[in-house]
Amino acid sequence: MEPVELLRLTLHDEERTRALAAGLGRELWAGCVLALAGDLGSGKTTFVRGLAEGMEIDDHVSSPTYTLMHSYQGAGLELFHYDAWMEGRQKAVLQEGGEGVLDTQGVVVVEWAPKVAQFLPEKSLQIEFHHRSENCRELVFMGLADPWKAILDGLSERVAPVDES
Ligand SMILES: Nc1ncnc2c1ncn2[C@@H]1O[C@H](COP(=O)(O)OP(=O)(O)OP(=O)(O)O)[C@@H](O)[C@H]1O
Ligand SMILES: [Mg+2]
């Protein structure tokens, strides 16, 4: 199976991005990997804050740009939040976040995932963030249809319809 485009959504403000991510956060399982791509300020960390809400994590989620990884305990699962932006961190993600963490009890989310793409499993859900205007972002979800399609179909149905004109 090849990764395919599963969903493309325009989110007109930060709240919608967080709400969508919270919905996804309620559907995740141990060992799943979300690979986030997009420029500075495109909304990756904002999305992770929403994921954390959905996983019932009460802590404030801050960017792990300089620390590589932050982990948070949710109601059911732990969230491992990586950022592969910094030089030389790719190897660290492999060592700390490679097989070990990817097999774990937790959900793994990686910002700047293209920098470590070769280390991430094929079954990762890839999410591209595109900056469309000050408060508007377009998100493109790609991955294997099994298991992601049913989850994303359910998620998109719950997003309030927006005027695309
Ligand atoms: N629709 C939207 N979705 C997400 N964020 C938005 C939206 N509209 C505006 N924003 C703002 O854009 C910024 C996104 O910053 P964020 O830290 O999430 O980006 P990032 O992709 O993690 O950047 P970096 O690469 O530096 O880690 C925030 O200030 C947020 O309030
Ligand atoms: Mg960030």
Image (tube, helix red, strand yellow):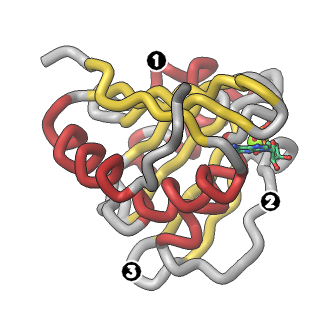
Percent from the top left, x then y, of residue 89? Answer: 73, 30
Q: Quadrant of ligand 1?
A: top right
Question: Is residue 69 visible in this depiction of the protein?
Answer: yes
Q: Is residue 55 left or right of residue 13?
A: left
For residue 95, above or below residue 79: above
The foreground one among 161 and 151 is 161
Q: Is residue 26 left or right of residue 149?
A: right
Q: Secondary structure at mark 3?
A: loop
On residue 64, the disc is: none
Q: Which residue is mark 1?
A: 118
Which residue is depicted at the point 72% across and 25% down? Answer: 131
The amino acid sitting under disc 2 is Ser
Q: Quadrant of residue 90?
A: top right
Q: Which residue is mark 3?
A: 76
Q: Earlier in the sequence, mark 2 or mark 1?
A: 2
The amino acid sitting under disc 1 is Gln
The amino acid sitting under disc 3 is Gly
